[in-house]
Image (cartoon, rainbow, N blue to C red):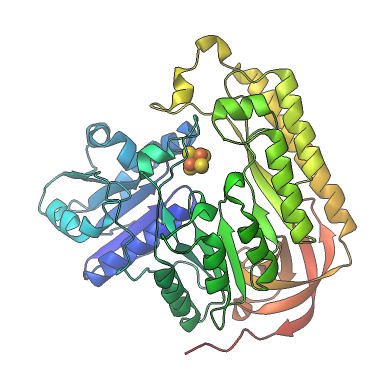
Amino acid sequence: MPTVYVETYGCQMNVSDSELMLGKLAAAGYSPVEQPDGADVILVNTCAIRDHAEQRVIGRLGELKRHMKSDTVMGVTGCMAQRLGPQLLEKARHVSLVVGPDGYRALPQLVEGARRGERAIETSFDLEEHYEDFTPRRFDKVKAWIPVQRGCDYRCTYCIVPTTRGAERSRRLEEVVRETREVVASGMSEVVLLGQTVNSYTDGTHDFADLLRAVGTVPGIRRVRYTSPHPNDFSDRVIAAMAEVPTVCEHVHLPMQSGSSRMLKRMLRRYTREGYLDCVERIRRAIPGVSLTTDIIVGFPGETDEEFEETLSAVREVGFADAYTFIFSPRDGTPATRMPAELTVPAAVASERLQRLVETVRTMSRQRNMGLLGTRHEVLVEREAKRGEAMLMTRTRDFKTVLVPGDSAMLGQYLTVELTGTTGSTFTGAVVRERQPLPMAG
Ligand code: SF4
């Protein structure tokens, strides 16, 4: 059997796409392997969201060359493949396949062609494509990524995703429910619904509220999460579904990007600071104890000190449990790159702002986390923390990370833990009560 190795960069959507690619190639007779050495096919599934991510991949492609046999096929898939297309074949002569996010159906034929010495590019969009008939080869044995939507119809001025993943389209609710049942039958009880703006989901008949209710009531499902929503798509129906379906976890990753209405307008986020804070308020009112995390960009063109201060004040006002913070990275082809050069924020200023933002987020989360010591929570054991350390990485329903002692036999179990310590962002805990996972649904 020929072997295939897939390496994944970027977001959970890419992880899910890698699982679909591996499933497709396994069905075509390829055996997935966990190391690149000597693999017959090496695929690098890439991210284009920041220049840094792309540079890492370029470097990695060079390194992977060392692991190739004389007849190994090397392919690049995902957003960078879509963005750069033929340039990738020119830049990396050992790459023979370039396949964008809508081209994975043709992978077996493209790989066969490449094994015969052909070089191929497949970057056309297919707005009907959801890979419904693929059986994903899941990496994770405890929680399942389920894509419910592909592409994006927003046009945030800094973002390359609409260019690399095309227009938004949603899977049919029945298909998502079918996949959820399969996930339960395979022994998992947590699903994470994925979409670029997942709460704008619509299959023409059902909205995201319907989807949460349908997935959340599949027998055997115990936790439902989703990522990433857009603040504008938090209808009262969606918030009510979150509040009313007990399996939907009390955590929302709600990208804010900036706390300044002027910057938000420039980013074309389509909400104001007040609109974002109102969304937070509506979610909090409906779901007591909900935890909020976010994404924030600093140094976007034209960001003044005052506007950055508004971001800091919004962070303080919301009290995020955590934030993924980034310095603006210009992407060719996005409107932000056409903004006047004098609006560019100097790198040193952007770095200093990032540092202050990170410190603000950390200080607040440390304070809050210290106050939680001694409380008890239900956690799901997700994986071993580090090989050989006899510690497990677990998560609470509201997405806190808790390290507890234990071994791999406990993966997938629900436990009750008492929080005993915190590093600021993560906790250590003591197991108070062990519980078995739900029996497998047939
Ligand atoms: S909502 Fe904006 S940031 Fe998110 S994927 Fe779409 S364009 Fe990009």
Is any part of residue 298 visible from this angle? no
Does residue 80 sit above or below 398 in this rendering? above
Q: In the image, what residue occupies the spot 25% across and 67% down?
A: 30
- Residue at the far top: name it: 342
Residue 132 x/y as whole percent = 32, 67
Does residue 425 sit above or below 95 in this rendering? below
Quadrant of the drawing holding the N terminus: bottom left
Left/right placement of residue 197 relative to residue 346 reads left
The quarter of the displayed image where residue 47 is located: top left
- Residue at the far front: name it: 205
Residue 257 x/y as whole percent = 62, 36
For the residue pair 322 and 171, the one nearer the viewer reads as 171
For the residue pair 390 and 96, the one nearer the viewer reads as 96
Left/right placement of residue 404 relative to residue 1 reads right
Report the label total.
0
Residue 228 x/y as whole percent = 56, 51
Q: In the image, what residue occupies the spot 73% across and 42% down?
A: 277
Left/right placement of residue 184 relative to residue 376 reads left
Q: In the image, what residue occupies the spot 53% across and 79% down?
A: 218
Residue 380 x/y as whole percent = 66, 72
For the residue pair 43 and 341, the one nearer the viewer reads as 341
Is any part of residue 310 visible from this angle? yes
Q: In the image, what residue occupies the spot 51% across and 11% down?
A: 341
